[in-house]
Amino acid sequence: MNNSCTIQAKTVRKIAIAVESKGVDTRLLFEATNFKAETLDDPDARIPFAQLVEIYEVAAQLTGDPNFGLHIGENVSPAAFEVLGYTALNSATVGEAFARIARYHSIWTNGAEFILQTNGSSSMLVYRYLDKSIKEHRQDCEMTFAAVASLCPRIALPSWSAGRLEFQHAAPADCSEHQRIFRCEVLFGRDENKLTFDSSTLALSIHNADPTLGALLDRHAEELLSKYLPRDSLLDKVRRLIGLELRGGDPSLDRIADKLGLTPRTLQRKLRESDTSHNDLLTEMRRELALSYLRDQKMAICEVAYLLGFSESSSFHRAFKRWTGKTPNEYRLSHLE
């Protein structure tokens, strides 16, 4: 278990309440996951994020509810996420709310991150686990997206629904609850946990948002963010810069180092301290973007190669085959929807 990835301990409270409502003694849950009940009395306590994810999985087993996470998520209040929830609620639009959630998420937990991506008429909200020790995360992930999918209609547009939802975990035997809650295509066994929706959603106004309160909350959130920085924040900055430069720019080591105000040698040294390198991160970003772009049937493969910074399509073909064992066209055909 990676103890450097933590989450506010108070989040366990809503799990305990749900477990009790199903007639299960919370002591069984806490004993099975080595969670100390008195931790809930400390408003500032944090626990390993992996422990929280395990608590969700064990709760599903003890209650006999395979959709435990879904059921918590569809009923959760933004207030449960405190500053993170209140800054979202007091944003002018859904797009601003998603941007704040992505920026301030480490205040709640640095074990996972939200990434908001927009590609023309489609936008994506990606939920990525940063704690690589976590292998099973169905309940936490489904709770997270159920919360997003249930809150958007409640705070912005009652008729809103996503276009597609993708999960990394395998499909359960019964997906009827997923269909009821998400009201869209739900896919399993995918490369990312990702909610895709129409970009027009980002412009939707949030009911009862208070811009004055929002500004105050932003200042408070920024203060907290300086205390609870995103995990591997340098890596996050390098990934973001590489992602931006790949779109027709220059993702080279010299360029990224200059953007960060570092020498190339210093940046490489800092990256080595995190067991990675500029080349590793560039390859990782190219692979992730390639998988995403190739699912868009309207995007030509030569265009994908250009956007990823390959001077020739043949170089992209060789790299993609090395990453996935398939040619770009073979991968695209296997993901026709």
Image (tube, helix red, strand yellow):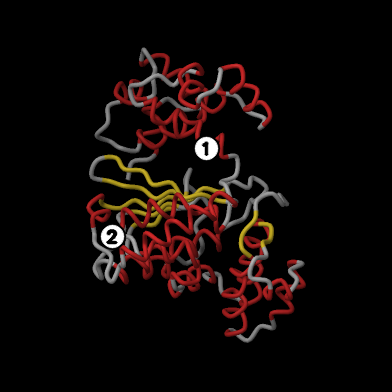
Residue 221 at x, y percent in the picture: 48, 57
Label 1 packing within 10 angstroms: few (<14), some (14-19), many (20+): few
Q: Which mark is residue 92?
A: 2
Q: Amino acid at mark 1?
A: Asp
Number of numbered discs: 2
Residue 31's place in the image compared with 235, above or below, is below
Q: Earlier in the sequence, mark 1 or mark 2?
A: 2
Instruction: Tell me what residue is drawn at x 41 percent, y 33 percent.
Output: 289
Question: Residue 170's x, y, as percent?
Answer: 53, 54
Work out which quarter of the rendered image holds the C terminus and state it.
top left
| Residue 86 x, y percent position in the rendering | 42, 66
Please state which of residues 29 and 316 is positioned toward the viewer in this rendering. 29
Q: Secondary structure at mark 1?
A: helix
Q: Left or right: where does residue 221 sit relative to residue 122?
A: right
Q: Which quadrant of the structure image shows residue 163?
A: bottom left
Q: Amino acid at mark 2?
A: Ala
Q: Relative to residue 112, is residue 256 depicted above or below?
A: above
Label 1, label 2: how far apart the Cα atoms are: 27 Å
Name which residue lies at 56% across and 46% down.
230
The percent coordinates of residue 326 (x first, y second) are: 46, 27
- Badges 1 and 2: C-beta atoms under 8 Å apart? no
**For residue 311, above or below residue 187:** above
Residue that appears at 65% across and 55% down: 6
Of the two numbered discs 1 and 2 in the rendering, the one whose residue sits closer to the viewer:
2
Q: Which mark is residue 21?
A: none
Q: Is 211 positioned to the left or the right of 40 in the image? A: left
| Closest to the observer, 30 or 42 | 42
Label 2, residues with CA under 10 Å away: few <14, some 14-19, many ≥20: some
Q: Residue at x 56, y 49 (%)?
A: 226
Element type where label 2 sits in the image: loop
Q: For this rendering, which residue is in front, 167 or 87?
A: 87
Q: Which residue is mark 1?
A: 236
